[in-house]
Image: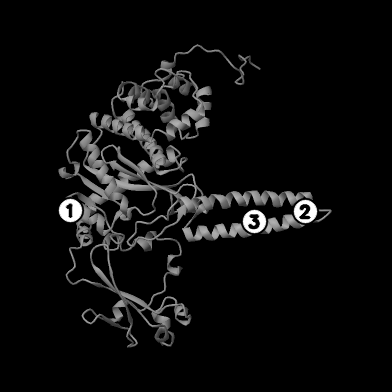
Amino acid sequence: MPKYIPYDYNQNAMVVINYLDQLQPGTFEHAIHYLIDNKLDLSIFHCKYQNEDNGRPAYDPAVLLKIILFAYSKGITSSREIQWCCETNIVFKALSCDTVPHFTTIAAFVSGSSVQIAQLFEQVLLVCHQQGLLGNELFAIDGCKMPSNAAKEWSGTFKELSAKRDKLKRQIRYHLEQHKKLDAQANADDERKARHQQSIETLNKAHDKIEHFLKTASPRMGQGKRRKEVKSNITDNESAKMTTSKGTIQGYNGVAAVDKKHQIIVDAQAFGEGQEHHTLVPVLEKIKQRYKRMGISEDIFAGNTIVTADTGFANEANNSYLYQQKINGYVPDNQFRKRDPKFSEQKQKYGKRHQDKAVGQKVVIPASAFEFDPIAMTCVCPSGLLLSSRGIRPEPDGQQRALFTGKLLQCRGCDLKEQCMVNPESANHRKGSGRQVSFLLRANAPPNYTDWMKQRVDSEAGKQIYSHRMSVVEPVFGNICTNKGLKRFSLRGKTKVQGQWQLFCMVHNLEKVSRYGKVG
């Protein structure tokens, strides 16, 4: 057996190193070290400190930023883990110059610097512009819905939360009665008494939490076509319930606008609503203001810069905004693929398994089979019966819609009930309803901007332009959510969550500078 030099990995050693030598050119750690020290203005953080005359010295924001950005690039968001990395990892030691900020210092810096992070995001974007990484030819906008640091079980309308509070009261009374009965017994089980006491304390905390929220907060109103109350959340009322491909979550929608040339993120905002259509205008306005503030363009969209967004951003109001502001936008409706002959066989080739066997919504007699008289404002059903008018409702695009419903007694005995109603049993209940139909009143209607957008998207040029959207914005979300490991927001409140979202987007942009720009 030949002789080898013995070795043991489980040992400690005193090694003399130079921290600057650990930050090798070409690496991401060198890029953030160089850019923070030489290109970014960190005086924006000075207002957070008031220890010129008294108090202990604070950690330099440059050091905190370096270790936080590097940690986020590795998918590390826990402040405790960042502190541990500063104690054990040589790269973190080099970036922090062998200082070990306490995890509370790191957490407070991230959650309390949202305003400064937004300004820093803009500075990094200006560096990208100065190094020629922005094309300003096409911006692709999309959102990424992620859970927040709040449980959806604590969500509900004020009526639902009041009912939950009353239910907790009943449970508390029950446990109090059981506790009193056990007290009256001479040989009572102490373990059962302890369980009831623990239940009372837990239920009291939950009751007081809901009670305090109902007294101090106001009902949260949605931003849909008809404003109505949506579910509030006791833990983080700025977050919202959202439907995703992985189910319903309580979270935020991280919206990003991405430049086509090098996939640089030009705007990053977090919204606590599941619907995306109302986020388009704030994003475009922010981009316009940012480019003017950075001195790149007085009006970036006046230069024919293309804006693309997916179907979640499409509605009449957004199309009207794009038309009125003369923005070269392409935002298709959710039926644009059905109008394209290229996708006529898409379902047969790539549809879901067993889609032919799937049971969809019941097919009923369409509204077109009803006789509607817009002059007399009457509607007659296929059975020849006159429906009751429910008035006229204005639509968001300025048009009006006439509403009609069948009388219960008429629909209950109608021979076409099974073919006419989705739920025929509704007509048999005194609190049910008959068949409901509606008709658009197109006379003297204002210009329809949705039709204008359909023509743009359905044109050959529109199809070619919109085909770039997915390849521009989706890889960005793949990098942030998969490579960087952002699966959920760990902070609460829209301002703090937006700061964390912008930090991750800043890491993405810094990687682009490190790879395609000039560093050092």
Q: SS at mark 3?
A: helix
Tag 2: residue type?
Answer: Asp
User: Which of the image's four quarters has the C terminus?
Assistant: top left
Could you classify mark 2 by the number of other residues whose Cα lies within 10 Å: few (under 14), some (14-19), or many (20 or more)? some
Q: Nearer the viewer, residue 338 or 138?
A: 138
Tag 3: residue type?
Answer: Ile
Tag 1: residue type?
Answer: Gln
Disc 3 to disc 2, C-alpha distance = 16 Å
72 sits to left or right of 389 = right
Residue visible at 22% across and 39% down in the picture: 136
Front tag of 2 and 1: 2
Could you classify mark 3 by the number of other residues whose Cα lies within 10 Å: few (under 14), some (14-19), or many (20 or more)? many
Residue at the spot of label 3: 172
Q: SS at mark 2?
A: helix
Residue at the spot of label 2: 183
Front tag of 1 and 3: 3
330 sits to left or right of 505 = left
Do the CB atoms of the residues marked 3 and 2 lie less than 8 Å apart?
no
Residue at the spot of label 1: 324
Q: Earlier in the sequence, mark 2 or mark 1?
A: 2
Q: Nearer the viewer, residue 234 or 182?
A: 182
State the mark number for residue 372. none
Q: Position of residue 361 (x, y in %)?
A: 41, 70
Do the CB atoms of the residues marked 2 and 1 lie less than 8 Å apart?
no
Q: From this view, report whether residue 51 is shown above or below residue 479.
A: above
